[in-house]
Image (cartoon, helix red, strand yellow):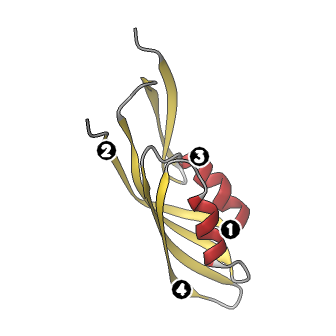
Amino acid sequence: MNTFKYRTWYLDNDLQVRGWVPSNSDIGVTKLTLDVLKPREISITDLALALGEIKGINNVEIYVTEVDAKTETLKITISGWNIPPEEIEELINKYGSIRSIDAVVVSRKRQ
């Protein structure tokens, strides 16, 4: 008998997808692309390393797309298996803010 867990996927700052999935589901978020605003004094290396510590994340790519006097706009691409969007959002909010989620890839685990 399958047990179910309630999952929330964040597609954008105002839009969430919620639903029940089997707890042993072989479907998960494998890639996220985020548009992030952060203060200039925070290093992108520190942010990348902090994101890389989250369970399920294998790769973090950060590109600076715009620089202002006090802030930087970043394009962050995160990949792995069963990436937890909630943990990513919580961590990024400590460093700056997510302006938008530009892409989400959900994949079935290979057997």
Tell me the amino acid under the disc marked 3: Glu
Q: What is the number of the mark on residue 11?
A: none
Q: CA distance from mark 3 to mark 4?
A: 26 Å
* Amino acid type for the residue under numbered disc 4: Glu
Check disc 2 and give the amino acid type: Ser
Are the residues tagged 2 and 3 within 8 Å (C-beta)?
Answer: no
Location of residue 108 by image quarter: top left
| Figure quadrant of the C terminus | top left
Q: Which residue is identified by label 3?
A: 86
Which residue: 63% across, 69% down?
A: 47
Callout in the foreground (3, 4): 3
Query: Which of the marked residues, 3 or 4, is nearer the chain's N terminus?
Result: 4
Residue 2 is drawn in which quadrant? top left
Tag 2 residue: 107
Query: Where is the N terminus found, in terms of image quarters?
Result: top left
Q: Callout 2: few (<14), some (14-19), or many (20+) C-alpha neighbours within 10 Å?
A: some
Which is nearer the N-term, disc 3 or disc 1? 3
What is the x, y in percent for residue 98? Answer: 58, 63
Precedes in sequence: disc 1 or disc 4 = 4
The extreme left residue here reads 111
| Mark-to-mark CA distance, 1 and 4 | 15 Å
Label 1 and label 2: CA atoms lie apart by 28 Å
